[in-house]
Image: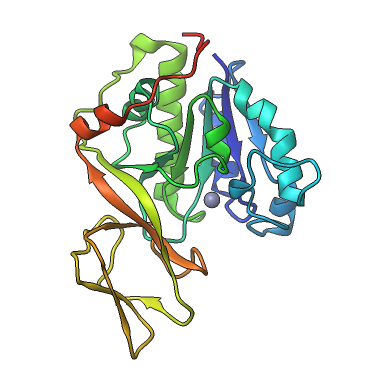
Amino acid sequence: MQILINVCTHGDEQIGLQVVERLKQLDVLTSSTTVLVANEAALKADVRFIETDLNRSFPGDPGGSLEEQLAHSLRPTISAADVVLDIHSTKSDLKDAIIVTKLTPKTLEYIQVIGPRNLIFMNIGTGTALISQAKIGIAFEYGQDTEESAIAATTEGIERLVRHLEQPQSTPTQNDTRMMNIFEVYSDAKRPEGYTILPSVHNYMRIEKGEPYATNDTDYIFAEEAFYPILFGEKTYKTYFGFKAHKLSLEEVNKILQPDAEKFDR
Ligand SMILES: [Zn+2]
């Protein structure tokens, strides 16, 4: 079982470095775990990316942008690991969220061990994100770099999962104490120039059909259908507000489960 702990996919999200420090202190990093700093150049420059967003640059291109070349060279490492844990931070008010691009039985089992309040299934643009190249890819978005609660919860979730993977009997696979909300992202929400999100809008809080959710102070944008805003924020993306999602029941999740990767060694 090889577990890849990936940090700094976005160079200005440095929470992963602190999490890795804590995992070291807790003796969680063993021979079955590898730590990868994905975008060293962006980390040094303290920017999200140098030329193109690495998390939109997969599968990569040896003749492409700096990040497309990087994606191309990282890809074998990412697809060789049994599990890839990709640690991000977020400036949106999204808290305690796990993001996946594939929903498989093993992925769900591992997420239940981690025990987040919210699971986001990104069912758009799959194939360009780092975790999409993994057999099982799980991204953490628990809060801001400087938030102690985000650092602690990310560390705790990874610790639980690593211990579970090394010794499956040691931790319960089901976290009964917390109900997990599962959201399926089906679209981005385009941001026309000059528009900002209304203060009434909060991540994970349903927006009804016909409800306004953004304004340029003269006009409003109304929801064409009811949706859940995900990763909505003023500091996150320039050309879109965030993403639109449906909330899924466990039954619906079971219906859309994809098979686990073949040759999975457990
Ligand atoms: Zn990120």
Residue 123, given in percent of the width and then of the height, sits at: 40, 43
Whether residue 64 sits left or right of residue 151 in the image: it is right
Rendered residue at 48%/18% (across/down)? 261
The residue lying toward the viewer, choosing from 82 and 179, is 82
Figure disc tally: 0
Residue 229, given in percent of the width and then of the height, sits at: 31, 59
Whether residue 117 sits left or right of residue 176 in the image: it is right
Rendered residue at 44%/50% (across/down)? 148
Residue 146, given in percent of the width and then of the height, sits at: 50, 56
Residue 266 sits above or below residue 15 on the image: above
State how the image is colored. Answer: rainbow
For residue 107, which quarter of the picture?
A: top left
The residue lying toward the viewer, choosing from 164 and 122, is 122
Rendered residue at 26%/68% (across/down)? 223
- Can I make out residue 135 in this image? yes
For residue 190, which quarter of the picture?
A: bottom left
Rendered residue at 49%/63% (across/down)? 236
Furthest residue toward bottom: 218
Residue 89 sits above or below residue 172 on the image: below
Q: Quadrant of the N terminus?
A: top right
Furthest residue toward front: 224
- Can I make out residue 22 in this image? no
Residue 48, given in percent of the width and then of the height, sits at: 63, 57
The residue lying toward the viewer, choosing from 152 and 129, is 129
The residue lying toward the viewer, choosing from 162 and 65, is 65
